[in-house]
């Protein structure tokens, strides 16, 4: 009985994952993206010894420096490898977390992709689950804002635009990962690359702004943990709005 149940559940997961990609391919922009970018993606993965049907991904964004890093690995691998960096082509707001609708801020913190929009006003877009549990504690209780995306185009108000050309590629990487069963693709958004030097500069410049520095101290722990192990640290959201990194 257990074997039968396991087979049924496995079949459901595979079918459900495959149907996600099939649904995405019903949209012309997604089909065009695959036609244009798939061969290049396969080459990038081959160079890293990653199979596309085993792909899992992790995104790290840096507001200062305007970069999004794409990391990937096979499901069976322990460590992620850097696949590519994408340039964020337009800035919005300043360093620090997003706290309310209309503040023009790009969020900072620990997120995941919660939406795929194949018919976006900005070509293709990947939704980020802002506000997360920590944001809901610290942000404006009436209207913390929302609808934060990594998207195409060159314009933005609080999002991360990477041009139509680059979003085609990144979107496919994420579609493939989700189709492989990765239901939550982590997106960690940092104020900058948190080297010891950069971190000291940030703490010195914003030493009286604990809303920023308290978050950055936790992000520094996560940043260093990943850089050391190439494994995504576990982030726990506490009831007081803080985080615990494990």
Image (tube, rainbow, N blue to C red):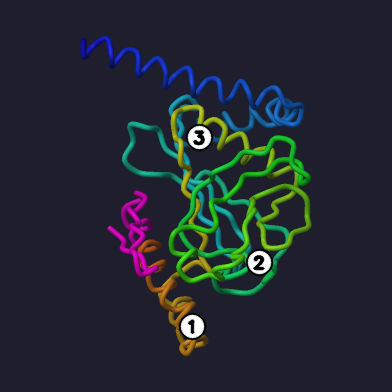
| Residue at image coords 46%, 48% | 186
Residue designated by label 1 = 201
Q: Residues within 10 Å of mark 3 (few under 14, many from 20)?
A: few
Query: Which callout, 1 or 3, points at the residue further toward the start of the chain?
Result: 3
Seen in the picture, residue 68 relative to 192 is either above or below; the reply is above
Q: Nearer the viewer, mark 1 or mark 2?
A: 2
The answer to whether residue 111 is magenta is: no
Coordinates of residue 209 in the picture (x, y in percent): 49, 85
Q: Are marks 1 and 2 in contact (CB under 8 Å)?
A: no
Q: Is 37 situated left or right of 191 in this image? A: right
Q: Is 93 situated left or right of 43 in this image? A: right
Residue 97 figure quarter: bottom right
Q: Nearer the viewer, residue 214 or 86?
A: 214
Task: Give the CA separation, mark 1 to mark 3.
Answer: 36 Å
**Residue positioned most to the front:** 142
Seen in the picture, residue 234 relative to 13 is either above or below; the reply is below
Q: In terms of secondary structure, where does tag 2 sit?
A: loop
Query: Which callout, 1 or 2, points at the residue further toward the start of the chain?
Result: 2
Residue designated by label 2 = 101
Q: Residues within 10 Å of mark 1 (few under 14, many from 20)?
A: few
Using the image, tell me which numbered label, if any, was put on residue 47: 3
Residue 224 figure quarter: bottom left
| Residue at image coords 63%, 32% | 40
Coordinates of residue 58 in the picture (x, y in percent): 47, 46
Q: Nearer the viewer, mark 2 or mark 3?
A: 2
| Residue at image coords 23%, 11% | 3
Image quadrant occupied by the C terminus: bottom left
Question: The magenta stretch spans which residues?
Answer: 225-246
Task: Give the CA separation, mark 2 to mark 3.
Answer: 42 Å
């Amino acid at each position: 009985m257990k074997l039968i149940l396991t087979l049924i559940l496995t079949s459901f997961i595979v079918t459900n994952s495959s149907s996600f990609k099939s649904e995405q391919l019903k949209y012309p922009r997604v089909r065009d993206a695959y036609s244009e970018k798939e061969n290049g993606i396969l080459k990038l993965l081959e160079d890293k010894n990653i199979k596309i049907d085993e792909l899992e991904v992790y995104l790290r964004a840096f507001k200062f420096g305007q970069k999004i890093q794409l990391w990937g690995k096979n499901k069976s691998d322990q460590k992620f490898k850097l696949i590519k960096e994408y340039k964020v082509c337009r800035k919005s707001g300043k360093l620090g977390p997003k706290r309310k609708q209309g503040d023009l801020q790009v969020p900072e913190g620990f997120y995941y992709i919660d939406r795929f929009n194949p018919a976006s006003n900005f070509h293709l877009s990947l939704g980020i689950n802002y506000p997360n549990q920590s944001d809901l504690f610290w942000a404006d209780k009436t209207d913390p804002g929302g609808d934060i995306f990594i998207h195409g185009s060159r314009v933005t108000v609080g999002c991360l635009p990477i041009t139509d050309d680059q979003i085609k590629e990144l979107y496919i990487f994420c579609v493939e990962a989700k189709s492989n069963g990765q239901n939550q693709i982590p997106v960690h958004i940092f104020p900058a690359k948190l080297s010891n030097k950069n971190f000291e500069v940030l703490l010195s410049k914003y030493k009286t702004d604990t809303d920023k520095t308290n978050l950055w101290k936790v992000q520094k722990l996560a940043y260093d943990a990943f850089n050391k192990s190439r494994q995504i640290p576990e982030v726990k959201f506490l009831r007081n709005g803080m985080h615990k990194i494990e």
